[in-house]
Image: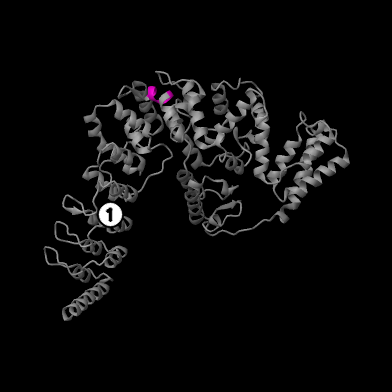
Amino acid sequence: MPKNQQVHSSVAQEYNERKNEDDMDACGIAQLNEEEATRLIIKLSKETAAIIIIDALDECDPDRLDPFISLLNCITRETEGIKLIITSREDSGITSKLNRSYQISITSKESLPDIRKFVSFEIQNAIDQGRLLNGQVSSPLQNYITTNLIAKANGMLLWASLQIRSLCNNRALKLPDDLMRQLQSFPEPLSEVYSHIISCIDRIQGKGHDLATSVIRWLLCTKDPTLRATTAFLEAAGLLQIDSGFAKTILDVCCNLVVYDITSTFFSFVHFSAREFLETRKEFSRSTSESFVLGVLFDSGFGPMISTARPLDRYRICYWPFHYDGSGEHRRELFEHHVKSFMFDGPQTSKRYIKWANYFREHYLDKRKSTTAANDHSDGIVETGFPQGDITDPIDLASCNGWLEILRYYQKNEAADAFSKNSRNIYASATKYDQLSVIEWLLECSIHPSDDNITQMIFQQRERIIRTLIGYEILKPNAEIDGQPLLVLAVQARSSSIVELLLRTGATVDCLDREHRTPLYHAIWCNIESLIDLFLFWGADPGIPDNEGITPLKLAVQRKIQVASKLTFEMNGKAESSDRNGIL
């Protein structure tokens, strides 16, 4: 930033507040999340005009893309001085969601002049720096290389860039003939380019190959791709001795698949498409990468004392649960070799784990109170990024995240009555976060949900779980909880899917609650037209009176609900049918 340019007051205030909250033992000053950044941008718009440039929006994490676009729309809607310039591959799913946007499409033909300038400049630069054939390139050969690359690039700057880097390999390409053969054999689809790079990495001997694959796995799942964290991780893995050239070493062994930004000190893949390609390969799948990283974190030690003396200590404290959660089919092995001894002492939670959990909650969760799932009927699953549940209780953490290996260990080592008693809480946590695998495991253990658990399942609209209970014949569609039919509870939960599920599996459409009221009565009371139509489709009778003599039809008239005429028509139709049957 120029010396004569000051940080805007809103930014400075936010930074200072976060700096004061930081106790220097944490992973650094807490970063703004998306919503906090949006609020700050809107606030800044009152102080200054600005242009925000977002490159490659299509490379955003698919799970976070829609919320991020909503925040961008919020900025454009609530500010006048903030303009957005966004680039993306052609994607109708993105363009249709961006409000008030003016779109410019750029084809390969339109980008040809830019490709020509880029290739010409990079080839000349590589010759001048001695990176291409040690600088010994004749003018005809230079023209031949440039022309071929421009013709084959088909408007793809990334393809041209990767091929130029591949040509600048003085160890493998020493003669003009070698370079020309390489130029002729270039694969054109990006996926084949990436396959070629992986083949080059596979040919690296010894520790260099291990270093390259470790870097790739780390970057596929790390929460901190900075130079500091990356080198600390690789040193802990025994793959890198820190010296002045370690960044260049990492780039060399990764054969142009990885780049390094000096300004941000971040490592990253050369393009999002490289990540997409790598994730399709078994050796770089998410579960393989996450389990590898977790193994290194635990191999380098979770001591009896909480320490943040080394860079990897901070990372381990903050992020081991993320990597454990993402380890998939490898979690069972990781639990046996690493996590079990850290988390448990027999059936009891270990002192080491309790120290970590308390430290983490105090320093990184901002002393956020854990919510009890048992009586929580709120709808939906809150996405926080961190594995859900009470981190001070491994069983709750496992229940909320579907970590069955931990639950199996707990069942095996805990007294039967204590396990049975705690099953209500396990059901509650699994229901809150829609962990069907945990529910199925409990059923296989012959542990059934309580009435409170079933009520929670209905009000949180867990159709999959209700369907599973019916399939296991644990729950009958006509069952009642405290005198209330399940069908009535489903109406009160406003869940059309559960109502239809119960009806299709045998629930009586005109079942009665304690006040002699039908599900149709409750649907009218709640004014849910879709449910009213559903009940009428299933033959609900609008003329059944409750204990006070009020029928669903009368209730609809009293409350001036628009479907009253439809109910009258249904009543008349039934009366006419009854008359005809009497005559016959």
The residue positioned 52% from the left and 44% from the top of the image is 61
> Is 174 on the left or on the right of 494, as rendered?
right
- Where is residue 545, by image quadrant? bottom left
Give residue 574's position: percent from left, percent from top: 21, 74
Q: Name the outermost residue toward the bottom.
A: 583
- Where is residue 244, by image quadrant? top right
Give residue 278's position: percent from left, percent from top: 59, 39
The residue positioned 52% from the left and 58% from the top of the image is 99
In the image, the segment drawn in magenta is: 337-342
Q: Dominant secondary structure of the magenta stretch?
A: helix
> Is 213 on the left or on the right of 358, as rendered?
right
Amino acid at the residue labelled 1: Ala
The residue positioned 30% from the left and 27% from the top of the image is 412
Front one among 7 and 447: 447
Q: Does the rendering let one see residue 435? A: no
Pointer 1: residues within 10 angstroms few (<14), some, or many (20+)? many
Position of residue 216 relative to residue 522, above or below, is: above
Q: Which quadrant does the N terminus fall into? A: top right
The colour mode here is: one colour
Q: Name the outermost residue toward the top.
A: 304
- Where is residue 163, by image quadrant? top right
The residue positioned 42% from the left and 37% from the top of the image is 386
Give residue 353's position: percent from left, percent from top: 36, 24
Disc 1 target residue: 493
Q: Does the rendering let one see residue 194? A: yes
